[in-house]
Image (tube, rainbow, N blue to C red):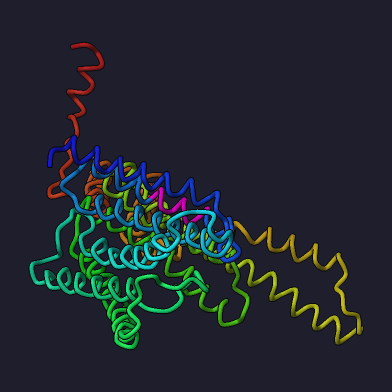
Amino acid sequence: MSVRAAAWLAWSALAVTTGFSVLVSFMPSEQNGLEIIVPLAAWAVTSSAVGALIVSRRPGNPVGWLLGAIGLLVGASAFFSQYAFYALVGRTGSLPGGGAAAWLATWPIGLAFGLFTYLFVLFPEGRLLSPRWRWILWFSGVVIAASTLSEAFMPGPIEGLQPVQNPLGIEGAGDVLSFVSALADFFYAALFITSALSVFLRLRRAKGDERQQLKWLTYAAALLAGVAALGVVIELSGGAGWWFFLVILISLLGIPVAIGVAILRYRLYEIDILINRTLVYGSLTALLALMYFGGVTATQALFRTITGQQELPQLIVVAYTLVIAALFNPLRRRIQSFIDRSFYRRKYDAAKTLEAFSAKLRDETNLDALSDDLVGVVRETMQPAHASLWLRPERASAEAERGD
């Protein structure tokens, strides 16, 4: 396929995805309101747009095609799901093709979910880590096909569209299809763990630009994993709601954005700064919040025990706030130093070496000793293949100044 044809196909897929996303915004339902539909549509458009951009620049990289396909499938699933609910439940008979839309809503989202396996094992250049990983492509294809077919022909109510029935459900094969679907879900989990392992192994072996690209993806994936883990805790405590689904979608939005930035290599090396700042300010925020709420809770319990009053005086709360504000910069410097020592050791050692040399430079008067120290600092911090220092002789310098 020519570059022009590939770009036209990718941008056409984006146009279709955008159309689905716009239309679904006008069809909110009782089960899926605008607070869920709009973020889901935005994610589909973003994924498809990043995919189209990558395909138009690098049509030979399958990552762009995968992103475009995932966005299109998510947009189609959201549209047909809302269309079917509106036609068959919300306003019965008001729209044609409700049954067909119900069937088209059953399987695209599962297919899109399965394509993430290919996305992770092929990122960033569209090649496998080694030929030994070829099996994961074939096995993923089998699992995706089994999951898609079982969902497409599962009898009974469609998940998320109750009481709408699957119009193409095979009644006699319900138990078999349920078993296949459960087995496919198990293998999906195993494949996602394996694909994450491939990204980790690729990161360990990668150098230069590829390593920076992989850092973008791992950063976005780690953010998503952290939010998902928090969601499990909140769900177990019974406090999760639609708002947390919105947070998950926003975190998931980081995957296509990170992939687009990494592959197109726009401001690629800013990722180290972004990761560093996230670690520092994320840890700082969590620590300050823990200190504030822990201190206020402990003080309130002590105050209640001593005085019998339930509420803390506002003066104590204000004092705690001022203390936390005063601790911001000292804690930030300590956390920054800890993270640099733990995760950016080479940068930390280089900074310390330069700091020591600067202090020595103020006191040392021996030019030969300073020259040796300067060469040593360059070798230690920049680690070049060869380093040497040449100083113009003092006599030649004096003659040059006199104009001789």
Please provide percent x and percent y for residue 7.
23, 39
Q: Position of residue 93 (x, y in %)?
A: 53, 58
Residue 168 colored in magenta in the image = no
Could you say which is closer to the camera, residue 162 or residue 196? 162
Q: Which residue is found at the position 36% from the left and 54% from the top?
A: 71
**Res. 333 in view:** no
Which residue is more in the foreground, 355 or 164? 164
**Which quadrant holds the C terminus?**
top left
Q: Quadrant of the N terminus?
A: top left
Query: Can see residue 218?
Result: yes
In the image, 58 versus 331, the foreground residue is 58
Spot the residue most to the top.
Answer: 403
Which residue range is magenta in the image? 38-46
Q: Residue furthest front?
A: 93
| 45 part of magenta stretch | yes
Determine the main secondary structure of the stretch shown in magenta: helix
What residue is rendered at 35% in x and 82% in y?
A: 171
Residue lying at the far left in this picture: please name it: 131
**Horizontal and vertical percent position of residue 348:** 37, 58
* Left or right: residue 154 compared with residue 96: left
Figure label count: 0
Q: Is residue 106 left or right of residue 318?
A: left
What residue is shown at x 40% (from left), y 48% (from top)? 46
Dividing the picture into quadrants, the one containing residue 149 is bottom left
Closer-to-camera residue (22/194): 22
Residue 57 x %, y % = 23, 39
